[in-house]
Image (spheres, grey):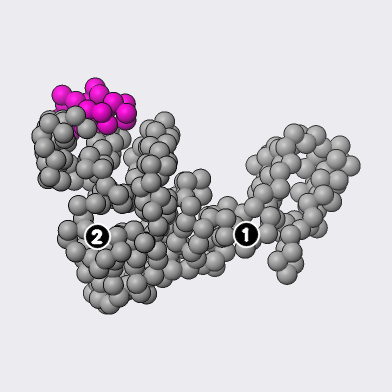
Amino acid sequence: MSIVALNNIRKVYDQKVAVEGLTLRIEPGTMFGLLGPNGSGKTSSIRMMIGMTVPDSGSVELFGQPFTRDNLKRVGYLPEERGLYKKMNVLDQLVFLGQLHKLSAATARRRSLEWMDRMEITEAIPKKTEDLSKGMQQKIQFIAALLHEPDLIIMDEPFSGLDPVNGKLLQDTLLDLRKAGKAILFSTHRMDQAEKMCDEIALIHRGKLVLEGSMREVKREYPRNRVVIDFEGDDRFLGHSSIEHVDNFGGHAEIRLWTVDGVEPDAQPLLIDAVARGTRISRFEVMEPTLEEIFIEVVGGSIDA
C-alpha cells in the first residue's frame, strides 16, 4: 500500500498552471525527494497532498484511501513558511501544538522535552519564540511536526536557515526516522542534499514531472563522464581533446568528458597526458554526474531564477 498516491493532479492559479498532470507514489519507509527550483510547483503539490488546496483535476490518496481530513492525524507537516507564536513560551507552545494533535498535556510535555534534548536546544525551554534564532525556531517547528508520531512526515525546505552543524543533526534525525519505518517526503531546491539522502526522487520543472525513479535508476541512465583532479604544476593537460568542458580552479579541476552515443568515455588518456607533462596528481577520480547536473541536462538549462 502506498502512503501517498497523487494521480494526475493539476492546479491553476489565475490562469497560471502551478502543477500539470503530476503522478507519483511514496511507499512506507522511503525517503522521497520532491525536487526542483523555486517556483517549480513543489509547495503547490504538497498543499494538495494534505488538503490545504484541492486539485482542479486528478485525485489524492493517503494511506491507500481517498483523501479525508481524518487522514491528517497520521501526517506531520513542516511548512516552508514558519508559523510559531512569537510571544509564547517555547515549551508551552509545543505542549499546546501537541494537544491539537489530541495528545494529553503530560504526553506532549514529555515528548517535547525528549525531542528538545535530542535536537540540542534545551536552553530554549524557558524562552519565548521571538528570542530564538531562525535556526532554533526551525528546530522547534520540526519538533512540533513530530510530537504525535506521524507515519508520513512532510518537510518543505526543512534545511532553510540551518547552519552546517544543525543541518547535519536534522539530516541524521530524518534518516533515523526512515529506519524506523516512517515515510518521509521533503521538498528542496538543494539537489546535493537529496542526492545524499533520498531513496526515490521526482524532479519537477514549471509544474511538470521531468524525471522520477530511484536514485540508482536515475544515475544508471547517465554515463560516468565527470573527472575531478587535484594537481600541482603544468595545467596544459586541461586542453586535452577528450574534454568537453572544464572548470579550472587552480590546482583543482572539475571536468566533463565527451560522450558519444551514451558510451562511457575512457579517462586514462587524460591522466597519461597530465603525467607526461610532469604534473603532480594527488587526486584523479572518475565520477557519475551529480543530480544537479542531470537536472540541468534534462531541462536544457532553462531553470527559472
Residue at image mark 1: 220
Comes first in the chain, label 2 or label 1: 2
Question: Which corner quadrant holds the C terminus?
Answer: bottom left
**Highlighted magenta segment, given as a residue range:** 112-134
Q: Secondary structure at mark 1?
A: helix
Amino acid, disc 2: Ile
Check the image and report above or below for 234 versus 77. above
Percent x, y for residue 98? 16, 40
Percent x, y for residue 256? 68, 55
Residue at image mark 2: 50
Q: Residue at x 58, y 52 (%)?
A: 290
The residue lying toward the viewer, choosing from 91 and 295, is: 91
Location of residue 43 (image quadrant):
bottom left
Residue at the right extreme, as displayed: 276
User: Taking 264 as reference, is 104 left or right?
Assistant: left
Q: Residue at x 38, y 42 (%)?
A: 180
User: Taking 277 as reference, is 199 left or right?
Assistant: left
Percent x, y for residue 112? 21, 32
Q: Residue at x 78, y 51 (%)?
A: 267
Within 10 angstroms of label 1, few (less than 14), some, or many (20 or more) residues?
few
